[in-house]
Image (spheres, grey):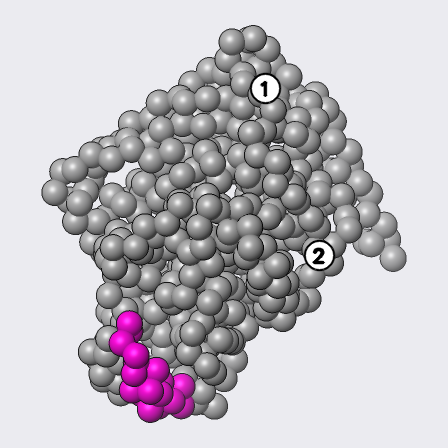
Amino acid sequence: MRSVLVLTVLLSMHLSASSQTYQRFFTEKTMRVDYNHTGTKGQETFSLDEVIEEDAWPGSKANLVDTLNLGEYIVRVFDVRTNAMIFSRGFSSIFNEWQTTDEAAAGLYKTFSESVRLPFPKAKIQFTIARRDKRMEFHEVWSITIDPNAPMQVKKEKNAFAFKANRITGSGNPANKVDIVIIGDGYAKSDMEKFRKDAKRFNESLFATEPFKSRKSDFNVWTVEAESQESGIDIPDMGVWKDNILGSCYSTFGSARYVLTTENKTLRDIASLAPYDFICILINDSRYGGGGIYNLYATTYTNEQVKGQEWQMDYVYVHEFGHSFGGLGDEYYGSSIAYNDFYMPGVEPWEPNVTALLDKKNVKWRRFVDPATAIPTPWEKAKYDSLEAERGKLDRLAADYYEKREPIFRAQKEILSDARFAGKVGAYEGSGYAARGLYRPALDCRMFSLSLNDFDPVCSEAINRVIDFYSK
């Protein structure tokens, strides 16, 4: 009883101190820093675009400094007068993914718009961005001073968009909840009822999956009914171009099913119509696809034309949210990707569910591993890979794709459902787009196979840590 009392007192003291920190340094508003990120392989520069005042800060007022250690980058904000770090957040970007493509390797330079949101500071701040080196340590790559009280430096215009926002899950104060905003792209005015049904469907899919199912009370979920001039989104490899409001596009980096948008400022303006920590974009199109980048957004297609395969959309929604929310890496390795050296050899990835296994005695998720479990953990990889090679020869866009895939898919699922490995955490070779040299924590997981599986224990812990951070 005494230990419970002590813990309660310590928690109360922490919350009180955090509240005082917020009140000392921040107002109730949100600051959005828009900047341009330019470069090519091995080179990058930053330049300020705009500083924007948005409505009330929706994030935690207690957890202001990031303790998650996720993301390729981290923004750190310092109060200039006291030199105290008053805010930080880890994140990844389209830019750092693009740097691993053939375009960047050829020396092409590109610019991407990016944003960071933070509580609106009361006084002058030093806004810095740091990036990980090959040892996964952060080093500052940009720093700029921002004066929130300078009349010419902060834009306070009314939001140009007036789309309807609704809360569809939860009823708590955004400061004490994880807030997700779902926005549609490629939904014309006549498609808006479909968007509402789609948002409901995918939201239910997320909270039918553990650990989100057990933590549903920690979330608010909002929708913004963004209208496009046309139904559908761009499909460049098929010569299809649409007037869709967020500019989402298939064939990102030359990958037919990778869906991203680079129209960051429009996305942020529309998202700000609701309180949000995380963004999900529903794509009103029928090609299988999606995408997810940590602390940026997740995308999912919403029209499955092949009867009986509709469940794949639910898989994509939750899988991609695993990237954007939990900082989880892809555990599969058989599909073709547009990246070169996405994970550097001999470097331990920052993603919590991928390891290079540089120290077999100290796997980074070792507390989940039974001492009797072999590291690396043997599994029927050769058999699985031969089936994956067969599946890789099929044309995903062909009319008979699913028919031809079915026997291969079934045989792979039999391997992954092997009872010997049920619930066993180990180090299974094949992960992070690499058949060799990278390992995943479980034989199967929502981040590995095309399935409606829950997240494995390691991924679940990572997700729970993020939920705790944003809901306290």
Using the image, determine if residue 120 lies above or below residue 449: above
Q: Which residue is mark 1?
A: 156
Between the C-alphas of marks 1 and 2, the distance is 30 Å
The image quadrant where one finds the N terminus is bottom right
Q: Which residues are magenta?
A: 396-415
Indicate the position of residue 399 as horizontal and vertical percent values.
Answer: 30, 79
Q: Which residue: 26% across, 80% down?
A: 391
Indicate the position of residue 216 as horizontal and vertical percent values.
Answer: 69, 61
Determine whether the residue tagged by mark 1 lies in a helix, strand or loop: loop
Q: Quadrant of residue 359?
A: bottom left
Which of 214 and 316 lies nearest the eye of the viewer?
316
Q: Which residue is mark 2?
A: 169
Which residue occupies the extreme top position in the image?
151
The amino acid at mark 1 is Lys
Indicate the position of residue 13 as horizontal and vertical percent values.
Answer: 78, 37
Q: Quadrant of residue 208?
A: bottom right
Tell me if 470 is positioned left or right of 316 in this view: right
Whether residue 183 is visible here, answered yes or no, is: no
Magenta segment main secondary structure: helix
